[in-house]
Amino acid sequence: MTTTATTLRTLITMWPDLHNALGDRPIHGAFGLGLRGYLTAIDHHDPTEAAALRADERDPAQLGQRPVPLNLALYDTMRAIEAALAHCAEVTAAAVQIDPIPLPGSDWPAADRARRTAASRADLADRRRWRFQRPGTPPATYTALWLLARIERRPGPFRTLDDVQERYIRTVAMEALRRAEAALDTSGDRMKELGPEHSCQCGGTIEVYGGGGATPCARCTGCGALWTESGVIAA
């Protein structure tokens, strides 16, 4: 059985491929740019700009090198994945993230107040905390890495996940990966049996094979005829 950690890692490594398929260059070494730069790059793909790029691409007056139009269906899939992961992280953080050490009151002894204040501020600034405070949705890789750390029991200001919380993360992660694989058609060879309205001339059932980036082909279970996109190649 595929573990939740493996599912999240697969989704993280697949994300640049989704950017590739989106019609833009993938962001290599994104975390080296800093989180602010990465978010700016992610926000580059907004629906209004995507529509403008498509209009430019269709304009016959546009000569020379033109922007690559975005795949809007894939864009929607990526945003949906980001939103689902972010909601999962927010729910998980609300349940397992430990509140920061409170600041000392004025009644604290002066000798201890500075130490307590420093500890409180350091705890509040802990980068392991879920603290995504900005308009919009955090990038999927950022959120998936945070969820992966929770699944792997990495140290930090968190309580241990219980079984219900683990199952919730697993469900969200598996659905996110399923959608990503479907968008890229990388989930491996698949077979689909067509209905009687698409039966072979011999009356046999037609099975269609595809996925994993392979060229689709179809085979009749009756006479053995084999089709590809270019037509019948064997009978």
Image: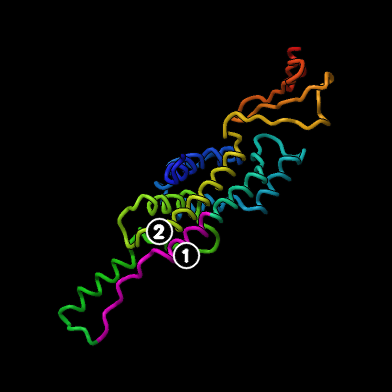
Question: Is 193 covered by the magenta stretch?
Answer: no
Q: Mark 1, mark 2: which one is toward the viewer?
A: 2
Q: Nearer the viewer, residue 139 or 183?
A: 183
Q: Amino acid at mark 1?
A: Gln
Looking at the rendering, the stretch of residues picked out in magenta corresponds to 85-106
- Residue under the point 49% across and 43% down: 11
Q: Nearer the viewer, residue 60 or 127?
A: 127
Residue 207: image quadrant is top right
Q: Which residue is mark 2?
A: 162
Q: Quick one: which residue is furthest to the bottom in this view? A: 107
Q: Which residue is mark 1?
A: 133
Q: Position of residue 112 (x, y in %)?
A: 17, 78
Residue 123: image quadrant is bottom left
Q: Position of residue 89 (x, y in %)?
A: 47, 58
Q: Is residue 196 left or right of residue 29?
A: right
**Is the residue under label 2 in contact with that under label 1 (CB below 8 Å)?**
no
Q: Nearer the viewer, residue 229 or 74?
A: 229
User: How would you rate the neighbour count of disc 1 (Cα within 10 Å): few for under 14, some for 14-19, many for 20 or more?
Assistant: few
Q: Position of residue 64 (x, y in %)?
A: 67, 34
